[in-house]
Amino acid sequence: MTEIETGTLWTVIILLGIGSFGLRFVFTGLVGDRAMPPWLLRHLRYTAVAILPALVAPQVVWPVATDGVFDVPRAAAAVVTLAIGLVTRNVILSILCGAGTLYGLLFVMA
């Protein structure tokens, strides 16, 4: 494992902070008091729908907990979450059912 020098680490942290502030400032400081065009608002509605699967999919397809080996509890939890979400259209309920399935199967199969 290569160790990063302290100066390099702080330089990266500061630059990332400035970049993050800059991105947020563009939307809140410069554009915040103006109305956004309808086409942009339409695209922004799909942000949450795209982010959640992008965060979860790698944990189902290549779970770190099993060193990338297929895992039945995680796959079943993903299927249950998707099914409950499609049937009920309730995000919280689908997440809770998926979490319950995951932890229940991990408990039963351990």
Image (tube, rainbow, N blue to C red):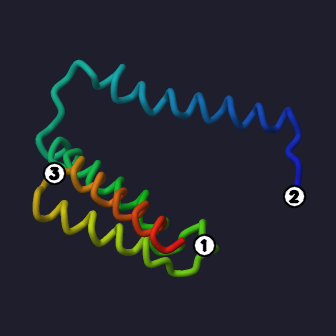
Residue 41 is tagged as none
Q: Name the foreground residue: 92 vs 108.
A: 108
For the C terminus, the quadrant is: bottom right
Q: Residue 41: image x %, image y %?
A: 17, 41
For the N terminus, the quadrant is: bottom right
| Residue type indicated by callout 1 | Thr
First of labels 1, 2 by sequence position:
2
- Give me the C-alpha separation between circle 3 and circle 2: 44 Å
Residue drawn where x is 34% and y is 68% of the image: 78
Q: Is residue 12 left or right of residue 22?
A: right
First of labels 1, 3 by sequence position:
1
Q: Are marks 3 and 2 in contact (CB under 8 Å)?
A: no
| Residue type indicated by callout 2 | Met
- Give me the C-alpha separation between circle 1 and circle 3: 30 Å
Q: Residue 51: image x %, image y %?
A: 35, 53
Q: Name the foreground residue: 95 vs 61.
A: 95
Q: Which residue is mark 1?
A: 66
Closer to the camera: disc 3 or disc 2? 3
- Give me the C-alpha separation between circle 1 and circle 2: 22 Å
Quadrant of residue 34 within the rendered picture: top left
Q: Residue 19: image x %, image y %?
A: 55, 34
Q: Helix or strand or loop: what does disc 1 sit on?
A: helix
Q: Helix or strand or loop: what does disc 3 sit on?
A: loop
Residue drawn where x is 60% and y is 72% of the image: 66
Residue drawn where x is 50% and y is 27% of the image: 21
Badge 2: how crowded within 10 Å, few (<14), some, or many (20+)? Answer: few
| Residue type indicated by callout 3 | Asn
Q: Which residue is mark 2?
A: 1
Q: Helix or strand or loop: what does disc 2 sit on?
A: loop
Closer to the camera: disc 1 or disc 2? 1
Residue drawn where x is 69% and y is 33% of the image: 13
